[in-house]
Image (spheres, coloured by chain):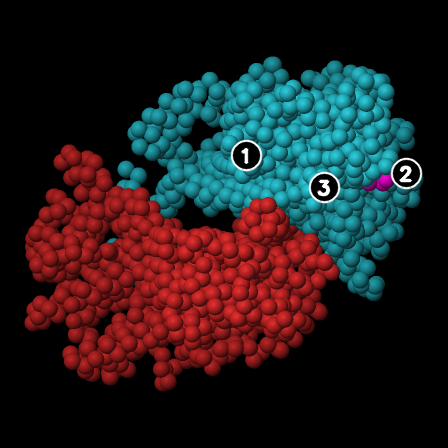
Chain colours: A cyan, B red
Amino acid sequence: MRRPEKYTPVPVRETGVDIINIKGIEDIGYAQQDSILLNALVPEENTHCRQGLYFQDGQRRVDYVLTYHIKKQSSSRRHSSRLTDNAFTRSLRRGRVPPPKGDPEVGAQEHSLHYHEDDKRFCRDEFESSLMEMGLELEKDEHTKTPGVGFVKIHAPWHVLCREAEFMKLKMPTKKVYEVKQGSNLVEKINTFITKLTEPLHPNVEENRIQNVKHLSYPFSREKQHLFDLSDRDSFFDSKTRSSIVNTFSTGITSLLANGVYMAAYPLHDVNGENAEPNDRKLLYEEWASYSVFYKYQPVGLIRKYFGEKIGLYFAWLGVYTQMLIPASLVGVIVFLYGCATVDDDIPSMEICDKRNNITMCPLCDRACSYWKLITACGTARASHLFDNPATVFFSIFMALWAAMFMEHWKRRQMRLNYIWDLTGFEDEEDHPRAEYEFRVMQKALKKEHKAQKVWLHYYTALKQGYVLCYVSLRCKLRNSPKENLVTASICAPQIGVTFAIVFGVIVYRISTTSALYMSSNPTTRSNVRLTVKTTAAIINLVVILILDEVYGAVARWLTILEVPKTDKSFEERLIFKTFILKFVNAFTPIIYIAFFRGRLVGRPGSYLYVFESYRMEECAHGGCLMELCIQLSITMLGKQLIQNNLFEIGIPKLKKLIRYIKSKRRAFQEEEQDKKLQRYETDHFLEPFAGLTPEYMEMIIQFGFVTLFVASFPLAPLFALLNNIIEIRLDAKKFVVELRRPIAARAKDIGIWYNILRGISKVAVIINAFVISFTSDFIPRLVYQYMYSPDGSMHGFVNHTLSYFNVSDFQEGKDPLEPTDLEYKVEICRYKDYREPPWSPTPYEISKEFWTVLAVKLAFVIVFQNVVMLMSDVVDWIIPDIPKDISVQIHKEKILMVELFMKEEQGKMQTLESKDSCNNHSPVPRPRSFPNSHTND
Amino acid sequence: MRRPEKYTPVPVRETGVDIINIKGIEDIGYAQQDSILLNALVPEENTHCRQGLYFQDGQRRVDYVLTYHIKKQSSSRRHSSRLTDNAFTRSLRRGRVPPPKGDPEVGAQEHSLHYHEDDKRFCRDEFESSLMEMGLELEKDEHTKTPGVGFVKIHAPWHVLCREAEFMKLKMPTKKVYEVKQGSNLVEKINTFITKLTEPLHPNVEENRIQNVKHLSYPFSREKQHLFDLSDRDSFFDSKTRSSIVNTFSTGITSLLANGVYMAAYPLHDVNGENAEPNDRKLLYEEWASYSVFYKYQPVGLIRKYFGEKIGLYFAWLGVYTQMLIPASLVGVIVFLYGCATVDDDIPSMEICDKRNNITMCPLCDRACSYWKLITACGTARASHLFDNPATVFFSIFMALWAAMFMEHWKRRQMRLNYIWDLTGFEDEEDHPRAEYEFRVMQKALKKEHKAQKVWLHYYTALKQGYVLCYVSLRCKLRNSPKENLVTASICAPQIGVTFAIVFGVIVYRISTTSALYMSSNPTTRSNVRLTVKTTAAIINLVVILILDEVYGAVARWLTILEVPKTDKSFEERLIFKTFILKFVNAFTPIIYIAFFRGRLVGRPGSYLYVFESYRMEECAHGGCLMELCIQLSITMLGKQLIQNNLFEIGIPKLKKLIRYIKSKRRAFQEEEQDKKLQRYETDHFLEPFAGLTPEYMEMIIQFGFVTLFVASFPLAPLFALLNNIIEIRLDAKKFVVELRRPIAARAKDIGIWYNILRGISKVAVIINAFVISFTSDFIPRLVYQYMYSPDGSMHGFVNHTLSYFNVSDFQEGKDPLEPTDLEYKVEICRYKDYREPPWSPTPYEISKEFWTVLAVKLAFVIVFQNVVMLMSDVVDWIIPDIPKDISVQIHKEKILMVELFMKEEQGKMQTLESKDSCNNHSPVPRPRSFPNSHTND
């Protein structure tokens, strides 16, 4: 019914045995016939087709290209095998097919390669003829300068474009033009002034001129063609739109790509290069993908025009985020400088550094450690003050509000872009079920209904749906039986378990090295113990994080494929969610451990807490764990950014290019050399395929986590993020413009699930910061001391107050220090940092009242902080309207203009219509709609 | 431009002086001319117009009625003045005009009444002619049986209906019918079984039969008339739709109503009564607005059909809420019964009641009070256990999840209704600016631009917009200069201040009465002191709440009017928000006081804390404040529901009817008697106008607050709410069907701002319940005792542990009890409930370590409870999809069907079009869209 009847469905008997059948059918005469049809146009002259952007006739634009591997009779088996492998590895990277490693089928596949090739050719012919039936025009080119690769160029003729644009409800600019008013005169003047002032910050692109007129947009409809300016049919739909229209035809293409039927499917880039005539890609290259314009705004409109809304939104978001980081880093630097400036006025660290306070501290471990002087902790105490001062409390409140502001600002920006990009009425496109899902449903049905008749019926249905057959037969060979959702949970949990285990391993490393080094007899080693261990541990952590990051990315993809989600959208969302969970846990577990668990349950001198008999619980240096948290944070963040950005994003592509170069040298040396002489579609074939925006977003989201989650302990995080992002934008820009195949333009109104993830992070950030301030920093104990215990309301005596007493005679046997003779005097009472009763109280070494007081205040602070900051965020969310006022006014105005336009049109029709119909003698003037509003904008 | 040119604009010079001008213009000949036109049809025969539902010709339906006051020359001045007042009071109630009381203008108005009447007539004529110009048909009827009231009946002819339906994008059922599948066979069978089982619960209405087929809906369009079944033009648009279409014409009507130009504007009800032929109203009366069907589901589809989507959604929401209350009350009752069953096993109350524990308690106040025995608190302790047991903790977690479930359930229900009611593609109608806002903008413009020329220009614009003139001139007389938004804040704050003051007043009453009664010498009085005081205080609170509720409703309305919001929607939202804040504070302040502030800072025996020298801070009875909270809650909730529902909602309408009856007896005795002989439009005129859904929602939202906010202390709240709602539904139903004029049907996709308020309440509920459990109940102290202090891990000794010691010799002079001889023995040490150091400690009467321990645990509990429950709610929110699966499948299916329908249509067109256009030899078959999905539903 849906396929033309002239195409006779091919009967196939069973899922597993179809290889021979298909082969047989193909032999009978199908492929032969079609390939003759397709090869009718032989690429001979190159003069017409203008650098490969047009068909041979030089008239019809190439909107889309499919490439496939040509199996030459002459070429060796190894060669074709290599190519198949390539297709497989790519498909693995793109997540379409998980080839079960070690599957016996793989071996079989190798054997049946020849059949495979025929299957593939059959599928291609099938697919291409279906495209042609839908009205597209194809040109095949197998004899290019790129050996072994065939190209199918696709052109969408005008009537197809119109039809599809109507179905897609594409909003196109009409002839009707209206004036965009920037509010009152004063506002307009100010705006003009600001624009002039920021002139050098704007990229040198047409789009950015302030436009006082805007074309009214309306969903394209062939019935209303008179509304649109169709004088130039070639440019009415731009190249991005044309390719995305062609893309809607190829629902099954992902599956065909995954099976290696095609190698790639991509729209063509514009020609880039010094000699090329000006085009969007060249403009983007000059005004966007260049480090020399790092201080400028991005030409978001142009990005959208060339890459589509989805990618445009990503860069717009990245821009807003980077812009918002400027005030955050400014405040962060000020907070840090405040810490630096007040370090000499900090009474507790002064007390620690004061030589007159000759405080003897208890050994930090049993046996091996000795007594030590508090004054040795002077440096750490002073350094801690840099990050642990009242300003950090202010800063973490500021950053919570900053996050809320950022979300609001983005919402408004998004709304503005939606308006400018004519997406206001756009609903998400219907989500096509993924081929894999279809396949699975069919498989299930087959399993259920054993009766032969029913199976036949199913096959018949499948066959009627054309090339579904192809991928069914191909997929069956892979026999990728989809697992249940439960699998995910049971595999995801171990993943997180692995992360925890590794964190634990690093802890154990740290503990054992510490004690080993402590026991070393070399005094210089011992003095450097802490620093060495801390730094090596942090670096080990970093390396582990980086490795696991890559592993987890693959694991998440694999798990999602096992789940077989129904639609591409749900596939993406599930994948993102899983990747996010795993990467997030990976990045933040060691940090959370240091912030909240380290040094909590250490016991007290004489009865330190042990795990596994000999490994003691870790303790933080005197002055709290904040300092160590800070080191860990900065190393992880800087390391991640430097290594992942520079090494992975710049280095690896360079390396790949090098390898490709070396490889190609052997086989076809001139390939790379002749780059300019190659057709456009050939050049693009050698670019990297676009792998989606997920990794780009993910990187930024993890960074956002670093910026907000532990900002109370590391106020410089926004600054680092800012510096990174300035590079990141241009780096990504270069990648998109030069190194990747042109992505298929996708429409999108928003950044989807990422927005929710951002919201989630900012909520979690409030709680985590509350805990960092009250439990990791010394803020609350100081506050409590000052207002409850201090005799004169100052901080004097705070250090003494936090130190408990220990009578050395209470050491259990075998736990007293081996070398107590380090000091010149006999130690009777030593001190340790805890709130415990002194030895002379009725309940010695019990937790004291002060401990509970401080704990209660800490907890109260958490409650107050969490609820107040959340309330403030909600208030910010509430008072800033989601839609900027001028935009809502414009949208309203557009609606009125549209109604007026149709009203005028109607008036003519109505007059004739009504004069017949109505018996009233008044004239049938349409009522003035919403007229009272027209003068509100005066 | 927008008005027909034949209508000459009337030039008017200034805002203030226009009365005479208008009068003059009117005299020249306008009104005369029009009234002749309108009075052409004189109501003589009654046979045709079928009980007043049709025009005199018996053909044209009356879709809308406007009524106005006829000033008879013969009638006394007082009479007309009364009517004007009526219009004013009504308009006040509807919130359109706030007549400034005591304004000198009111007097002037009284004087200029005669001019007024002429103005009004002019405005009416103006308005009516504009309606006629828009294609509506009018019939005037001034000689009805109701003296002094004129009726304008409006009929919308077919072409107007079609035109407007197209503009409003009304989705109408097409001829295309498809089958609704209920999933697989098994699911279908189960569904059929459930339907059969719940058969008696379903109302006896057509709609509720399971329909296996559904008409495909499509926005009505005259171009696509062939899609729709237009065989019966009279019933294609139902009466609700017709009246709402007419209503779209009368943008300025609210303003005209407010100024008394018209008395009322309403669509007609169906005829109700025993003899009437079956119609929707009658069916609703029988199957919905009756207490005898209280156990049944509501016929929501029918309600929507008769009253429109907005009211339909309210009742659907109320139904879902009531239904969800059933499990909540069940669990609540079980929790309460658990409390009852375990009261004898409760060790703390056993210890209090044990005569062997002869504990002497310290006096509860200085001087006046005496020592007392703990055993006297036995009853309170046992009663407290009913509401203060571990089950309540479970219950409040349950209720937080219940609230999340309820929100989710409602979202799904709403989505389902949207699908059934064809609202899936519906966007909110464009919001017309309110007339008051327009007026203000114009006034501002006038103030700004002093130059005469500009003023003239403005007036000219205004005049071109027809009857805007009328209300401008009328409104200017009232001179209601709109205040700035700031006013609101500055008035709202005192309002809340008043509430707090009143709460404080009640507290003072309670304190002073308590001490007065304590000092009384009568022992029986004294023993009843607590109960008397508590009950009277609660009742005073209740009365105050009820009175303030009414006051605040009026205040909120007044404030919102002062703000002059731009659109009706924003007016409604602001009003709701303000009313909600004020009423919420009003209802919950006393309860929050009891729960969290009472008995917190009382001091200790010998140094009780005093406010204002002689008033002591209140203390709770032994056993915590939970008992008192419970009493307060139940009295407020029950009282509010009983009094507001029964007295206000049933009693007052009855009283009003009585008054109207007595009044009418004097003037026109037969009016009420002849009810049946009156025309439909006359009967409806005497009904109460529909005042919006805000009060109905508000009542339910406050109730929702009672059900969720303090549920930890009063597990029976859901039960009371359930019982109330079962009555409430039928009460509201009766009101809507019988007592109110038919409301204008409004389309709505959701319940708007109420949903956000509900979400807000459930969030606040989590926090409040966390605090109630940890601070108001004894749950945490018991837990701490059991796991930290109890020698044997049981609760034995808990009472003793919570009581501190006081040495009577430490009483300051003049603070020791006057009558210490109440007991037989000499008291040396007395006990009091607090965690303080004993007299023999080094720091007597200081807060003890136990206090801080318990406090820390309490705070930790709050943090854990809040975050865990919120996380659980989010998880519930996340795992339950917002759109039920079957609905999303159906929506998807509908889309495909729609595309198919158009595809078929297109095929014909295309074939001719493409054969000219394309040069390919394949047939132009449209591509099968999203075909792979078609077999997923098999």
Q: Which residues are magenta?
A: A611-615
The x and y percentages for residue A306 are 57, 29
Q: Which residue is mark 3?
A: A845
Q: Given the image, on which type of amino acid does mark 2 rest?
A: Glu
Q: Which mark is residue A899?
A: none
At label 3, counting other C-alpha atoms closer than 10 Å, the crowd grade (few under 14, some 14-19, many 20 or more) is many
The x and y percentages for residue A447 are 82, 59
Decide which of B742, A677 is in the foreground and name it: B742
Q: Which residue is mark 1?
A: A790
Q: Are marks 1 and 3 in contact (CB under 8 Å)?
A: no
Residue A173 shown left or right of residue B335 in the figure: left
At label 1, counting other C-alpha atoms closer than 10 Å, the crowd grade (few under 14, some 14-19, many 20 or more) is some
Q: Residue at x 35, y 74 (%)?
A: B647
Q: Residue at x 19, y 70 (%)?
A: B149
Q: Chain of mark 2?
A: A
Q: Given the image, on which type of amino acid does mark 3 rest?
A: Tyr
Q: CA distance from mark 2 to mark 1?
A: 81 Å
* Comes first in the chain, label 2 or label 3: 2
Q: Given the image, on which type of amino acid does mark 1 rest?
A: Ser
